[in-house]
Image: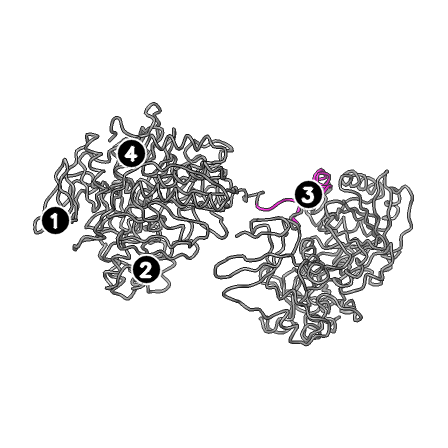
Amino acid sequence: MRVDGKGLIDRTKPVRFRFDGKDYAGYKGDTLASALLANDVRLVGRSFKYHRPRGVLTAGSEEPNALVEVLGPSNQTPNVRATMQEVFEGLVAQSQNRLGSLRFDLLAVNDYVSPFLSAGFYYKTFMWPRAFWEGLYEPIIRRAAGLGSLSGKHDEGTYEKAFAFCDVLVIGSGPAGLMAALTAGRSGADVILAEESHVLGGRLLSDGGTVGGMAAGDWVAQVVAELLAMPNVRIMARTAVTGAYDHGTYGALERVGLHKPARPNLPRECFWRIVAKHAVLASGALERPVGFENNDRPGIMMASAVRTYLNRYGVSPGKRVTLFANTDQARGVARDLMAAGVSVAAIIDPRPDASAVEDCPVHVGAVVIGSRGRLGLSGIQVRKGSETIEIETDCLAMSGGWNPTIHLTCHMNGRPRWNEDLAAFVPMEGAVPGLVAVGAANGSMSTHGALVTGHAAALNAVEALGRKVSVPLPEAEDMPYRLKALWAVEGKGRAWLDFANDVTTKDVKLAAQEGFRSVEHMKRYTTQGMAPDQGKTSNVAALAVLADATGRGIAETGVTTFRPPYVPVSIAAMGAGGRGEGFAPQRFLTSDQASRDRGAPMIEAGLWYRPSYFPKPGETTWREACDREVNMVRQAVGVADVSTLGKIDIQGRDAGRFLDFVYTNTFSTLPVGRVRYGLMLREDGLVLDDGTSARLGENHYLMTTTTAAAGLVMRHMDFVHQAFCADWQVRFISVTESWAQFAVAGPKARALVNSFLEVPVELPFMGVAPVRIGGVDGRLFRISFSGEEGYELAVPTRYGEALFRDLVARAETMGGGPYGMEALNVLRIEKGFITHAEIHGRVTAHDIGLEKMVASRKDCIGKAAATRPGMWGPEREQLVGLRAAAPISAGAHLFVPGTEVHRETDQGYVTSVGWSPTLGAWLGLGFLKDGRARLGQKVRLVDHLRGLDVICEVCHPVFHDPEGEKLRA
Amino acid sequence: MRLTCPLCGDRDRREFYYYGAEDYLHRPAEGAPLADLDNYLHLRDNPAGVTKDLWYHEAGCSQWLLVTRNTVTHEISGVELVAGRKA
């Protein structure tokens, strides 16, 4: 119910929202949990395994129970913590993990058979028959146990990711965090203050009290106002720091638009990578529940949460509240409730020496031993000595003390330290370099302790940054934190530890009994701590119960490893921008639009988009277009954009010497104005890449690489140069994007090229010359990848599109035209030219028949390994051509006709195939054991995937014009 | 993870390409004993502690870097240019 005059909600701004099909009203500033509690909705979900009715347990991101599905226009976000989801006009949410309605969940039958469903139940029960697991058991278990569901539709929401840098990152904005941010901010340091909630202030907003002589809330407002006014301070609310990583890097998730109605371009979330020189961890502490029979009913909540709902949201979760707590601090919950006019039935304090003086009945030395109420709490049983007391109550506020929120300090292998006085784990110092835990996160439980430690950590950081500042410390309460650890009350019934995964004290004891005594084993056997909340409220209690069951101390039992992320991070946020076209960069040719204008479908080649073929009216398949384009090149002239090939400009006195070192063959002897084919090896003797290099001047070469390996070759050359010959006079740079280059191939190629040149040139095969085209300086190469007389014309990129359109237009007047990747591929297969389909990283120079290109008179990269045994010889698979009358496929394997088809009899494989309109046959390139000695033999080609079984003839890989007469024409 | 490139300064690891151990820098001369070639190509230590390896500032200055780091603490104690090191 709503309590008048309390809370930080804006009562002038009512908000309507919907939960499970029913409309409710809340206020701006409410969370879904606070608004539902204000509407007296206590039942918000069903538990994971037993489908028990569950209500809100906490008021923060540690919430294990109140997980709901939030429905958006195009998305359904499961497992949203109602305690973190702010309400907004039009919010639609629904409960999850139920069959039927929330009140009458048919799967609640699980709870009645719970004696059979203890830890390890599935492992022990569903062992046979084996075949039943996949078909029967698993689908049923998956339906029954589970969390939220997805819409199954594509998420149209936008997400972002971003980097941020700062001197001091303050994590958390309670008293410790605010004090640290204020101190660092006043020093002039670059500060980021990250706060998970939508409001700054942390527990000061919930617990009240005074700071620096004013109400805590006023102090918060004053500090926040000052921080907001500082240009050197960035405040990131709704931002949970999720992980600590190497070298001052932190991951953080910002809820950018989740608290507003969706609209285009409003990101839902942003994943931040924050790089900080220093970090102050002021993440506070998490209150822990106490185990007693049926301690999971809706209406049983954390005491601190009850106080938060009252003071931050103006909501009392009950009309008659009972407090069950073992600290003095928790008494404030009851006092605040009474001051607000809410009835408090009793205070139950297990400490026998605790004060009994309050304005309500107090039972000291007493514990709660049970509860009742089917869909919500109606009463509890209390044991005091030998006496059992029944108390009518609709809300039980419980507290078993606090666990410092140390998660981030453990992300880099830090093991927390057990502190007996606090009965809690505290951070290991220096576990994350540059990060210091302060306040409750470090075990300083009073407001004064938080202010002092936050202030001190910030001063240290500021000093390390070479800055000076003096900030006075405000006065605040410094009540000693005095508790008697109470993890679970003795009793026979089921007492829940992990609410999210339905793990009870019995399950942990059973695990210990069955030999799972290590905390890591217990966790996996019982699934304690493995739910979306990662056991934030249950980890320490579970291991305390385990320690008790195994007769060890808690420190000795140890704690499971906390790993990032601290709170769930949606994959969509981490992968922001990487969906659809954002998956990889796109590179477009200068001729891209011209090709698309002609209806060419584009095909991806690495990051590039290249035309696949250029369809003509009447052509119904790509093959028709491809065959026509091949014939066009063989009979007239074709134009293709080959700008995607890597181009590296190499200059310097030692340029030739350097090329001799990276290529297997010699380039220092290449005359100026000539081009040579080169082969490059990796240091392990396998082929890295091939291509042509032209000598443009005495100390000037231009290398081309394959499209696929352009980046790889650049990186390799940088390594060879910097590692082995950094003192040589040679420099090189990629000029791939500086030149547009077009292949002009076919019997009429020379005529077409000459029609462009201001001064026609007579180039020999493998020659290069500077040319003038329409007033532009370009380059003309006489090289061929088709087997026809071929030229490549290069101009600066900005002239590329114009030249391509002009080349194609003039080619068409000569019976020619553009050709795409399909035709280019067929042309090169006919000619036996290799690509990275053949030089795929497992072939040697010998395998592709180019062993003579490894010069004997000089060293080169890969030479020593290439000559080792096993790198050459008849036992290796060697490049051959294949010819068949029926369709064949790349990826097929080769066998001796008449032998069985299996791995041991495998003779080789096929790398490239195509229909050759020139030869009227299916042609392929592939690798065959001792292939060069088997020319003329038949092999059996088998492709199980495509259902092919074809007899092929083994041929020399050069099918077309083997003497090269056309090339040199 | 972050690396301090001697030319570009403190940068996120996403700018760098990882190659392998510094052994790749010790290329045997032509005709060296086979054991040297084997060591150069195939044999690597896997230390728990200080190691030196090669990184390429691919999205930066194209320099190859020799990084001294600790595989246990993840501390990076030195970054030098491969081209600038004393042979």
Sequence-wise, the earlier of marks 1 and 2 is 1
- Please state if A95 lies on the left or on the right of A942 as rendered: left
Q: Amino acid at mark 2?
A: Gly
Placement of the C terminus of chain A among the 4 image quadrants: bottom right
Sequence-wise, the earlier of marks 3 and 2 is 2
Task: Return the mark for residue A471.
Answer: none
Q: Is A11 placed above or below B45 here?
A: above
Q: Residue at x 43, y 40 (%)?
A: A194
Q: Is A70 placed above or below A689 here?
A: above
Task: Return the mark for residue A210.
Answer: 4
Judging by the rendered image, the residue that carries numbered circle 1 is A383
Task: Return the mark for residue A588.
Answer: 3
Judge if badges 4 and 3 mark residues of a common chain.
yes
Callout 1: 10 Å neighbours few (<14), some, many (20+)?
A: some
Q: Residue at x 23, y 57 (%)?
A: A506
- Please state if A519 lies on the left or on the right of A352 as rendered: right
Callout 3: 10 Å neighbours few (<14), some, many (20+)?
A: some
